[in-house]
């Protein structure tokens, strides 16, 4: 096993393949489902969704303490690569900001597609087939559900798929 492979494996084990972030996303998608099931105007709902996405990092940090996950591995240089992969998603949120007033009822679909697609580099970083699978399934599922159903149904669907994602990660981490 090369030194790079060893560092990837150590990072995957210490950070439990980012399980704390996926658990946090379940909570956020559940909150988004409640927001879209409310009677608020759509632009207000979309504003609250932006607020929900903003709490991901502190929520994941708190969950990492509960799950006893090393939130940031300063000894492993690949940890910085994981941060770069995550920060890259922020650039795609510009698309979601454009959707906000333009096609407001499709904002959750765009957020879900961006979220799912941004997972692909983590499949390499964490040596994870689960991340690869969900990085492909989530965008296509979000597109289908988002075009066919209400934002509430999409958010509930994302909550379910993220919960399944968590279960699959737990199984993958045990192996």
Image (cartoon, rainbow, N blue to C red):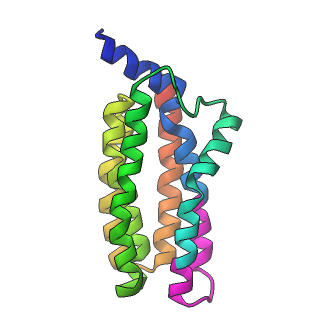
Determine if residue 67 is in view: yes
Magenta residues, start to end: 28-46
Magenta stretch secondary structure, dominant: helix
Q: Quadrant of the N terminus?
A: top left
Tell which residue pokes out farthest to the top in this image.
Answer: 1
| Viewer-side residue, 146 vs 114 | 114
| Viewer-side residue, 132 vs 66 | 66
Residue 166 location in percent, x, y? 52, 43
Q: Residue at left 53%, top 45%?
A: 21
Q: Residue at left 52%, top 26%?
A: 73
Residue 17 lies, with reference to residue 4, above or below; the image says: below
Residue 159 located within the stretch drawn in magenta: no
Residue 62 location in percent, x, y? 68, 44
Residue 35 location in percent, x, y? 60, 76
Residue 31 located within the stretch drawn in magenta: yes
Residue 23 location in percent, x, y? 58, 47
- Relative horizontal placement of residue 152, taking residue 118 as reference (left or right): right
């Amino acid at each position: 096993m090369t030194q790079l492979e060893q560092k990837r494996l150590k990072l995957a084990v210490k950070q439990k393949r980012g399980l704390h972030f996926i658990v946090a996303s379940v909570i956020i998608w559940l909150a988004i489902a409640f927001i879209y099931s409310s009677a608020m105007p759509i632009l207000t709902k979309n504003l609250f969704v932006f607020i929900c996405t903003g709490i991901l990092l502190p929520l994941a940090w708190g969950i990492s303490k509960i799950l006893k996950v090393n939130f940031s591995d300063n000894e492993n240089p690949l940890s910085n690569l994981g941060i770069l992969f995550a920060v890259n998603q922020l650039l795609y949120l510009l698309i979601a900001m454009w959707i906000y007033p333009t096609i407001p009822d499709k904002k959750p679909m765009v957020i879900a597609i961006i979220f799912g697609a941004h997972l692909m580099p983590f499949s390499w970083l964490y040596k994870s087939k689960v991340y690869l699978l969900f990085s492909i399934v989530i965008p296509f599922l979000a597109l289908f559900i988002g075009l066919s159903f209400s934002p509430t149904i999409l958010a509930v669907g994302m909550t379910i798929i993220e919960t399944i994602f968590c279960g699959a990660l737990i199984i993958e981490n045990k192996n």
